[in-house]
Amino acid sequence: MTEYSHSTEMGIRCAADIIRSSQRGVVLTGAGVSTPSGIPDFRSTNSGIWEQFDPFEVASLSAFRYNPVRFYEWMRTLATGIHQAGPNPAHYGLAQLEQAGYIQTLITQNIDRLHHRAGSKNVLEVHGSMGTLTCTRCYHTVGSQGYLEAYLEHNVIPHCPECNSILKPDLVLMGEQLPSRTWLKAQEACKKCDLMIVAGSSLEVLPVAGLPMRALENGAHLILLNHSTTYLDVRADVVLHEDVAEIIPQIVAELKKS
Ligand SMILES: [Zn+2]
């Protein structure tokens, strides 16, 4: 177990106190929650999955329409990582906070479904999800199970069971709009919350990075759990620059002490 400094221990206690006194908690998670599960951050240029590809040449909607085969080639690394990954202690800790009634809504930038698999219920996937595929012609939607395995194992590009056009995974590509109903719900939750916990996000990708600002404007407390600094560190009640897979279970354990 990691030995924490005095200030980190204070931060854990302080975070637990704030969570305990909140009524309407919202969590925002980013790639940092999934990297301990071995999933690369597909929006980060440092993640290694861009070494052979220019993002705008493959992972935009127009690129998908122009050359879906190349898009699927690019996606293979990401899909393989997600296929093999399981939830880590950060996912389980956040699910426990929801079950205990401390968190009402979990907003995630991640597309890997690991929050669902860990037991979180009210999840808003603002960057979409790899859990479903939608037809680019007739908009028929199917669950990705079976289709992604067929691609990964036998190179079969997913086709629509209704009209035989190519299916696109429902992750939000570069230049694509966020799913509008989900995004509206996320904004609403941030306006109404009295606590915002940011976990594993450096708050660099707009417009999602602006959500904690909305919470602050409405008087919510802010807890930031991330490896590196963010633009809102100066505004937060608690900032812990630690590994989320270690620090979140510590906070949950502290909450159970009371
Ligand atoms: Zn179709």
Image (cartoon, rainbow, N blue to C red):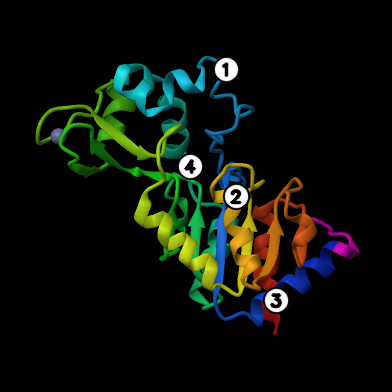
Location of residue 182 in the rendering, given as x and y in whole percent from the top left corner? 39, 56
Tell whether circle 4 marks a residue whose Cβ is less than 8 angstroms from ligand 1.
no
Q: Give the CA distance from mark 1 to mark 2.
A: 26 Å
Q: Earlier in the sequence, mark 1 or mark 4?
A: 1
| Horizontal side of residue 226 vs 75, given as left or right | right
Location of residue 175 in the rendering, given as x and y in whole percent from the top left corner? 44, 32
Mark 1 and 3 residues: CB-CB less than 8 Å, in contact? no
| Disc number for residue 209 | 2
Which residue corresponds to mark 3? 18
Which residue corresponds to mark 4? 85
Q: Residue furthest bottom?
A: 258
The mark closer to the camera, 3 or 2, is 2
Q: Amino acid at mark 3?
A: Ile
Q: Give the CA distance from mark 3 to mark 4.
A: 32 Å
Q: What is the secondary structure assignment of the residue under circle 3?
A: helix
The mark closer to the camera, 1 or 2, is 2
Tell me what residue is drawn at x 37 percent, y 21 percent: 63
Q: Give the CA distance from mark 3 to mark 2.
A: 22 Å
Q: Give the CA distance from mark 1 to mark 4.
A: 22 Å
Other residues around mark 1 within 10 Å, as few (<14) / some (14–19) / many (≥20)? few
Mark 4 and 2 residues: CB-CB less than 8 Å, in contact? no
Tell me what residue is drawn at x 47 percent, y 22 percent: 56
Q: Amino acid at mark 2?
A: Ala
Location of residue 38 in the rendering, given as x and y in whole percent from the top left corner? 56, 38
Tell whether circle 1 marks a residue whose Cβ is less than 8 angstroms from ligand 1.
no
Please give the range of residues in magenta: 1-7
Q: Give the CA distance from mark 1 to mark 3.
A: 42 Å
Q: Residue furthest front?
A: 217
